[in-house]
Image (cartoon, helix red, strand yellow):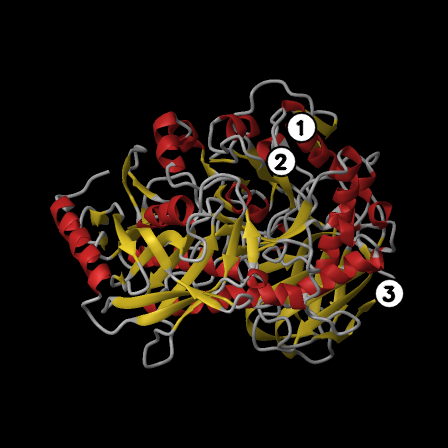
């Protein structure tokens, strides 16, 4: 890495810091207290299971550039251990061909695809396939490039719901899993009529409703209610082009919903011998407006095959597709390349299966393929972000149980879990059910219990992106410990059993990168998050994104990246970013690399600003080598702080302190500074962390430099020499 002439200054800083630590000459020392009472340990973890990183879909052009020995060597030097494979296809309403070789359900090569379970050609690339029966204009995963066939102006296309949510597959009545379509007219308009152009199968029983809330029923599902129009209840639908007189006189409405509970079970335009083509619901086009006494219908809907159409959302999508639907610009890295490249370090990896837009046979074959190759699997994530797809918890639960039964028939030892939520800071709310319950997670857990299948949930996974994109400010650092401890408690309060591990399978500061990712904020946030998560009882975490890609425009007028390195457009690593150095402190200095047991103990400081914000947070682990390591984050941008350290054992009623050699590793504003104006964004100085060693006793005072992360590591008096 480049040092930009900063070595002399760093050496001088180290010398000063050592003197400062020993003499305690600046300021009045405050105290960090570590509670080492054995029964107060908040968590035990193994780095090879708990401290990981995620590999996501990347551009197809970059695969051969970043899966190379020089880049991999630099990436692995950050110290992250296990890997989580992220599934991006479901966010984009696509089917995933994890194996390009496989079998289509229909003659001529189209329909439902099942990848080949038998190992054959080395799988280097895999791709998603757009779904032609899509009913989303966009959702929380898709971007503005897609459109819905419900308002595309083409009566030859049609939306169709997921067949695996019907009685032949759930073995429950279709009314148990009603399917729906929501329209957003963008503004409130007076209307009194709807025309639905049904495809096959159509709804025999359905409701047409309007939303009373002022905000989106998908974003604020408890801030209003769905009310059925006076003429909106259909009990014996006949399909075709149905014109409904919803009201006699127009009423002002923005959001509408079609709620379908009984299907005609007639066959669509595909192979009638496949029952998946003859269940569920299908709609060609929807028209909304006013019907006048002279028989004329005035349509308010914008029908166009682009993102400017009238917005529609749907409960589910049939995964039927064709070879022409391939989306080959984005690469879900091939399973063989993923496992053999070296990025997994040979450790078991968290692997997803396609559940929301897939089929059980394909998922079973995927796991069978990996096991046949001898690739180790730690966990299997069931789908990806159902909340971002606006899926109701019972629908996800119905799919979860079908896939779980199929996967456990293959291998009863598989650890299955989910729901793989988007990054949220509060409970996820949905429209109330018949009992008035609105918690997504609470209802999902209740669903599993009602079906006597809670044992099929081996872990609970979710993502963590605590800040809104492009709004990150320094003061947000003060909130992270409370944010992460709160959301972990939310899942437990929703009914997650205490013995079910909580895993964050993808994390960073926000869902869109910005300057805060690459400046010093990013390093402090990452260290604070990791310490807070483990102290609060979290079980495993995966930093996003492991593999570097070229810098992109970020918030704040600077280039930015999710990853740990800045990279040119021709895939040359330029320099590490702040989160790389924080990763090293976490994985190589605070934790002891390997599979040894670490115990996490609570630590607190009495350093706060005038508003009561904790300016210094501390996280303590007892490592397998018997040393205590304290990771301390000083969030003060203006001042260093001096502290004493006390280790209190309540059982023995004894205070201890570091004794003898103490390693001190610091990374902060003195070692790294991001400059948005230089070379479109670069760091100078750009590390490394400053290292020193001191001899400690009961009187030693330690310095926490301005805006820094410091690891202090050594033996305490009561345990030295054991």
| Circle 1 residue | 371
Q: Nearer the viewer, residue 561 or 613?
A: 613
Asked which secondary structure carries label 1, the reply is helix
Asked which secondary structure carries label 3, the reply is loop
Q: Nearer the viewer, residue 180 or 8?
A: 8
Relative height, residue 572 to residue 716 (above, below): above
Using the rendered image of the protein, determine whether residue 555 is visible from the camera's viewpoint.
Answer: no
Q: Residue at x 68, y 66 (%)?
A: 494
Q: Position of residue 245 (x, y in %)?
A: 75, 71
Would residue 322 be found to the left or right of residue 603 on screen? right
Relative height, residue 532 to residue 98 (above, below): below
Could you give the CA–CA distance between mark 2 and mark 3, rounded to whole angstroms? 49 Å
Q: Residue at x 67, y 59 (%)?
A: 286
Q: Residue at x 27, y 68 (%)?
A: 641
Question: Marks 2 and 1: CB-CB under 8 Å?
Answer: yes
Mark 3, Cα crowd under 10 Å, few <14 / some 14-19 / many 20+, is: few
Instruction: Please identify the quadrant where the N terminus is shown.
Output: top left
Q: Nearer the viewer, residue 161 or 425?
A: 425
| Circle 2 residue | 377
| Circle 3 residue | 235
- The answer to which quarter of the image holds residue 271 is top right
Mark 1, Cα crowd under 10 Å, few <14 / some 14-19 / many 20+, is: some
Q: Position of residue 661 (x, y in %)?
A: 31, 50
Would residue 394 be found to the left or right of residue 528 on screen? right
- The answer to which quarter of the image holds residue 611 is bottom left
Query: Going from the N terminus, do you reach mark 2 or mark 1 first?
Result: 1
Question: Marks 3 and 1: CB-CB under 8 Å?
Answer: no
Q: Position of residue 280 (x, y in %)?
A: 79, 50
Would residue 385 be found to the left or right of residue 242 on screen? left
């Amino acid at each position: 890495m480049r040092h930009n002439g900063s070595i002399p200054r760093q050496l001088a800083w180290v010398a000063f810091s050592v003197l400062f630590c020993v003499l305690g000459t600046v300021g009045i020392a405050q105290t960090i207290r570590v509670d080492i009472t054995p029964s107060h340990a908040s968590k035990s973890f193994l780095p090879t299971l708990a401290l990981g990183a995620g590999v996501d879909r990347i551009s197809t052009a970059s695969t051969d550039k970043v899966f190379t020995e020089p880049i991999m060597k630099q990436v692995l030097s950050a110290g992250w251990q296990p890997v989580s494979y992220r599934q991006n296809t479901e966010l984009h309403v696509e089917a995933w061909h994890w194996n390009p070789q496989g079998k289509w359900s229909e003659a001529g090569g189209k329909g439902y695809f099942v990848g080949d379970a038998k190992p054959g050609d080395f799988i280097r690339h895999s791709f998603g396939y757009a779904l032609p029966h899509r009913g989303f204009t966009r959702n929380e995963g898709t971007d503005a490039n897609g459109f819905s066939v419900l308002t595309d102006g083409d009566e030859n296309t049609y939306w169709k719901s997921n067949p695996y949510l019907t009685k032949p597959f759930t073995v429950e009545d279709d009314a148990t899993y009603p399917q729906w379509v929501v329209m957003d007219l963008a503004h409130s308009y007076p209307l009194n009529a709807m025309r639905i152009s049904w495809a096959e199968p159509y709804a025999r029983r359905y409701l047409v409703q309007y939303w009373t809330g002022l905000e989106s029923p998908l974003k604020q599902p408890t801030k209003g209610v769905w009310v059925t129009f006076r003429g909106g209840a259909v009990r014996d639908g006949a399909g075709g082009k149905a014109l409904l007189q919803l009201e006699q006189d127009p009423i002002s409405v923005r959001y509408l919903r079609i709620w379908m509970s009984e299907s005609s079970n007639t066959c669509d335009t595909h192979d009638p011998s496949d029952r998946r083509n003859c269940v569920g619901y299908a709609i060609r086009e929807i028209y909304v407006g006013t019907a006048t006494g002279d028989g004329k219908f005035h349509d308010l809907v914008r029908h166009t095959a682009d993102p400017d159409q009238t917005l529609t959302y749907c409960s589910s999508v049939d995964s039927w597709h064709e070879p022409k639907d391939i989306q080959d610009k984005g690469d879900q890295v091939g399973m063989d390349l993923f496992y053999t490249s070296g990025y997994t370090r040979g450790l078991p990896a968290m692997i997803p299966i396609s559940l929301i837009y897939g089929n059980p046979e394909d998922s079973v074959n995927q796991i069978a393929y990996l096991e046949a190759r001898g690739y180790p699997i730690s966990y299997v994530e069931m789908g990806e972000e159902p909340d971002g797809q606006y899926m109701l918890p019972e629908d996800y639960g119905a799919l979860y149980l079908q896939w779980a039964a199929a996967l456990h028939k293959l291998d009863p030892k598989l650890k299955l879990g989910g729901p793989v939520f988007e990054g949220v800071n509060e409970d996820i709310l949905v429209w109330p059910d018949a009992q008035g319950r609105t918690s997504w997670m609470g209802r999902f857990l209740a669903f599993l219990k009602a079906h006597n299948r809670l044992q099929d949930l081996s872990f609970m996974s979710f993502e963590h992106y605590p800040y809104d994109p492009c709004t990150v400010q320094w003061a947000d650092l003060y909130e992270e410990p409370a944010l992460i401890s709160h959301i972990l408690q939310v899942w437990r309060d929703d009914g997650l059993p205490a013995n079910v591990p909580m895993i964050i399978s993808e994390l960073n500061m926000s869902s869109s990168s910005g300057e805060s990712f690459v400046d010093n904020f990013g390093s402090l946030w990452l260290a604070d998050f990791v310490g807070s998560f483990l102290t609060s009882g979290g079980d495993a975490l995966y930093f996003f994104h492991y593999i570097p890609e070229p810098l992109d425009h970020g918030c704040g007028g600077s280039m930015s990246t999710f990853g740990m390195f800045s990279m040119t457009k021709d895939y040359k690593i330029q320099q590490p970013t702040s989160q790389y150095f924080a990763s090293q402190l976490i994985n190589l200095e605070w934790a002891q690399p390997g599979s040894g047991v670490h115990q996490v103990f609570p630590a607190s400081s009495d350093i706060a600003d005038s508003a009561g914000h904790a300016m210094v947070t501390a996280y303590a682990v007892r490592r397998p080598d018997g040393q205590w390591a304290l990771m301390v984050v000083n969030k003060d941008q203006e001042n260093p702080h001096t502290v004493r350290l006390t280790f209190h054992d309540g059982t023995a009623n004894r205070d201890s302190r570091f004794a003898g050699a103490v390693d001190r590793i610091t990374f902060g504003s003195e070692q790294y500074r991001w400059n948005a104006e230089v070379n479109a964004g670069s760091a100078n100085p750009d590390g490394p962390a400053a290292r020193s060693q001191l001899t400690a006793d009961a009187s030693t005072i330690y310095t926490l430099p301005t805006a820094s992360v410091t690891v202090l590591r050594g033996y305490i008096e009561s345990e030295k020499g054991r």
